[in-house]
């Protein structure tokens, strides 16, 4: 698979896919999308980069171990649920805030934090499996 | 998301409007705590020295949280928190009654003991593979299964604990472990699939997954819907999880392969989650169908007990014998479920709690015997009493306790179950329980006589398999303390059984009359 064409295209394709995955993640609350599907797109981006340029390059590029990313995502998702303790509402309630930044109203919520957590869990877990498979028997 | 400009409809139709009391946060707290600490430990999985220092205090905190929850439930009755502020049955409820809280507290005590024992039983590479993270995550799954009030959510927690258990099972990656893990994984996946199929079927019939809602609707649907099929499916799925005859063969095939501390956790907790699900779904939601099936369950129970203990008698490997004793205990609990009377159910609940503590401790004792220089093989073991009389004494207590002899914790639930079966004239079930007690005494007596009392045999000239180096390292204080702590619990529950018996009886009453459970989830409807 390591043709010149693929190797030259792969970095652009990967960065586009990661960008698209973040777009999908952010539009997810009211429209099709969200953390899970965004995470899958990002994980396939990593897999493509791994096929083209080798697993070591991917590991350097994401810096953290995929399992650590995944764990951080789980941590974020849980913390997003715990936030509702401060509002005296049950666990996992959606809390919204609407700050106005540069004249634009921004809808921020604990749901978004949860969804980013899901995104990271999926990127980490699927990415870890994909890289493991591409690596073969070596660890 | 844009803010809607039109005023919203009345939110109280869908939303819980009252603020949540701080004490009610104890309901999801055990699971949340396990997930938080577990994810931190995964992030720190390369820092093998740091992991027990975080995990063991966290497990202590977990014990306090679950004891606090038990106290909260004992004082205020069944409590509910529905996630995301949605009103039940649309939100996922965590409903904690005495049964849930009792099992949660007992299992977190066992997890703490496993955390302490694991410090000396798990080497650096296994820690890097994630012993402590998996320990915390499997506890999240187990506690979630105990605390949830929603059947699909129960399925999700089963998956969480199953995935973590796969991870724990293959720590070390020896070929024999992979062999055991494949059998374990395959059978458990079948059981989980059956559970999922049954859950889908249930949703099709009821249109709800909330247990309290099901308890209300079951009486209306009875006669109109094929509930017997549904309940039989659930029975098969959970009996497989609990390792009841005739779907028990995965347990002895896999439980002797992982690290001792992992076997101990599994033996203590995993099969009991299956028993809990049986008690909850058959005992509380579908009592009429359970009554119909009671002869079948009783038959399975009797076979599980007798065949389990006969397996233990036949084994040469002590770890395998312990696996068969786990199965035998499952039979005793199933007997209580088959009886279904208050005494029967409370006996089953008490026996489950006893079994969590004692089976874990028994595996610890076996692990310690190997560290004292004995072998897992009965033919090569010996001389343990001469080497360390204190540990031998603790082990004897456990052996007598698992056999159900007084004054230890196994005695009282067996008495309750024998009496309950005689009350309904099921003399053969009572006979099976008593026979199991006798055979267990012989089985553990044989192990005691050969491995502990017999003088150490002449050193075999390197004939046997070479033991795992982690199995033979010197005995540490932590391991002995973990064993000692669990032994103290079984003695305490044996000589002063009133509090736990009252707890189990109250929990059984809650199962038989779910009105408090329903009222906790639907406070308005029940009062109308």
Image (cartoon, rainbow, N blue to C red):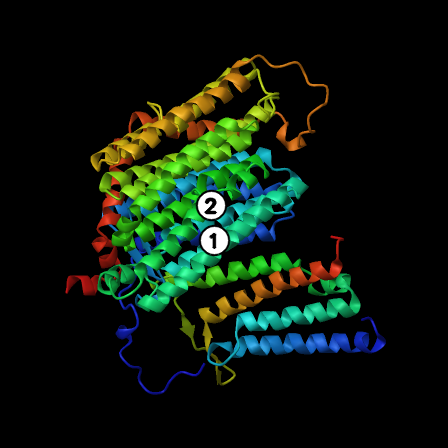
Q: Residue furthest right?
A: A4
Tell whether B130 sits left or right of A139.
left
Tell whether A1 sits left or right of B492.
right
Q: Secondary structure at mark 1?
A: helix
The residue shown at (79%, 76%) is A6
Tag count: 2
Q: Nearer the viewer, residue B465 or A121?
A: B465
Measure how far apart labels 1 and 2 are at the Cα level.
10 Å
Label 1 and label 2 in one chain: yes
Q: Residue furthest bottom?
A: B6
Residue labelled with disc 1: B191
Residue B321: image x %, image y %? 51, 30
Q: Residues within 10 Å of mark 2 (few under 14, many from 20)?
A: some
Q: Is residue A87 visible?
A: no
Judged by depth in the image, the label closer to the viewer, 1 or 2, is: 2
The residue shown at (30%, 25%) is B495
Residue labelled with disc 2: B247
Q: Residue furthest left?
A: B528
Picture quarter with the N terminus of chain B = bottom left
Residue A43: image x %, image y %? 64, 68
- Mark 1 and mark 2 residues within 8 Å of each other at the beta carbon: yes
Residue A64: image x %, image y %? 67, 59
Whether residue B122 is situated above or below residue A9 in the rendered picture: above
Whether residue B447 is situated above or below residue B192 in the rendered picture: above
Q: Which of the numbered marks, if any, corresponds to residue A23? A: none
Chain containing the residue with disc 2: B
Q: Earlier in the sequence, mark 1 or mark 2?
A: 1
Whether residue B29 is situated above or below residue B387 in the rendered picture: below
Q: Is residue A94 visible?
A: yes
Residue B337: image x %, image y %? 31, 43
């Amino acid at each position: 698979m390591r043709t010149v064409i693929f190797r030259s295209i792969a970095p652009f394709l990967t960065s586009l896919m990661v960008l698209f995955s973040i777009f999908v993640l952010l539009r997810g609350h009211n429209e099709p999308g969200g953390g899970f599907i965004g995470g899958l797109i990002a994980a396939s981006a990593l897999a493509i980069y791994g096929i083209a340029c080798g697993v070591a390059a991917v590991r350097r590029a994401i810096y953290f171990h995929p399992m650590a990313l995944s764990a951080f995502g789980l941590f974020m998702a849980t913390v997003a649920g715990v936030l509702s303790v401060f509002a005296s509402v049950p666990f996992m309630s959606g809390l919204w805030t609407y700050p106005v930044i540069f004249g634009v109203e921004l809808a921020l919520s604990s749901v978004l934090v949860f969804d980013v957590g899901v995104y990271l869990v999926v990127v980490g877990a699927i990415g870890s499996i994909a890289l493991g498979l591409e690596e073969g028997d070596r660890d | 998301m844009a803010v809607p400009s039109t005023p919203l409809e009345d939110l109280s139709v869908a939303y819980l409007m009252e603020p949540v009391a701080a004490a009610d946060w104890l309901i999801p707290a055990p699971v949340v705590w396990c997930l938080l600490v577990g994810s931190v430990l995964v992030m720190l999985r390369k820092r093998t020295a740091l992991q027990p220092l975080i995990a063991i205090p966290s497990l202590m905190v977990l014990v306090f949280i679950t004891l606090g929850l038990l106290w909260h439930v004992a004082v205020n009755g069944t409590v509910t928190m529905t996630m995301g502020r949605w009103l039940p049955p649309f939100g996922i409820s965590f409903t904690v009654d005495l049964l849930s809280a009792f099992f949660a507290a007992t299992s977190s005590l066992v997890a703490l003991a496993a955390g302490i024992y694991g410090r000396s039983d798990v080497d650096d590479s296994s820690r890097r593979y994630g012993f402590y993270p998996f320990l915390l995550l499997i506890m999240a799954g187990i506690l979630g299964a105990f605390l949830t009030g929603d059947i699909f959510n129960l399925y999700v927690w089963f998956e969480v604990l199953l995935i973590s258990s796969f991870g724990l099972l293959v720590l070390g990656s020896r070929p024999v472990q992979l062999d055991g893990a494949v059998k374990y994984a395959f059978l458990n996946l079948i059981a989980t699939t059956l559970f999922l199929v049954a859950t889908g079927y249930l949703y099709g019939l009821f249109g709800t997954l909330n247990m309290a809602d099901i308890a209300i609707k079951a009486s209306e649907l009875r006669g109109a819907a094929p509930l017997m099929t549904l309940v039989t499916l659930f029975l098969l799925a959970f009996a497989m999880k609990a390792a009841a005859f005739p779907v028990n063969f995965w347990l002895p095939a896999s439980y002797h392969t992982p690290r001792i501390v992992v076997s101990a956790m599994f033996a203590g907790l995993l099969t009991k989650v299956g028993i809990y699900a049986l008690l909850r779904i058959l005992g509380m939601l579908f009592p009429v169908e359970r009554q119909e099936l009671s002869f079948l369950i009783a038959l399975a129970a009797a076979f599980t007990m007798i065949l389990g203990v006969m397996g233990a008698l036949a084994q040469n490997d002590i770890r395998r014998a312990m696996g068969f004793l786990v199965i035998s205990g499952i039979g005793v609990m199933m007997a209580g479920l088959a009886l279904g009377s208050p005494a029967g159910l409370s006996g089953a609940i008490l026996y489950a709690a006893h079994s969590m503590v004692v089976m874990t401790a028994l595996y610890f004792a076996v692990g310690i015997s190997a560290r004292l220089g004995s072998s897992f093989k009965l033919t090569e073991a010996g001389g343990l009493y001469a080497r360390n009389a204190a540990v031998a004494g603790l082990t004897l207590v456990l052996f007598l306790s698992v056999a159900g002899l007084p004054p230890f914790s196994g005695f009282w639930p067996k008495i309750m179950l024998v009496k309950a079966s005689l009350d309904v004239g099921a003399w053969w079930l009572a006979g099976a329980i008593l026979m199991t007690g006798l055979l267990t005494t012989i089985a553990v007596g044989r192990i005691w006589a050969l491995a502990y009392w017999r003088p150490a045999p002449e050193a075999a000239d390197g004939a046997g398999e070479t033991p795992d180096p982690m199995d033979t390292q010197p005995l540490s204080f932590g391991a002995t303390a973990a064993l000692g702590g669990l032994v103290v619990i079984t003695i305490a529950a044996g000589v002063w059984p009133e509090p736990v018996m009252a707890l189990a009886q109250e929990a059984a009453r809650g199962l038989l009359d779910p009105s408090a459970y329903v009222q906790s989830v639907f406070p308005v409807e029940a009062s109308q």
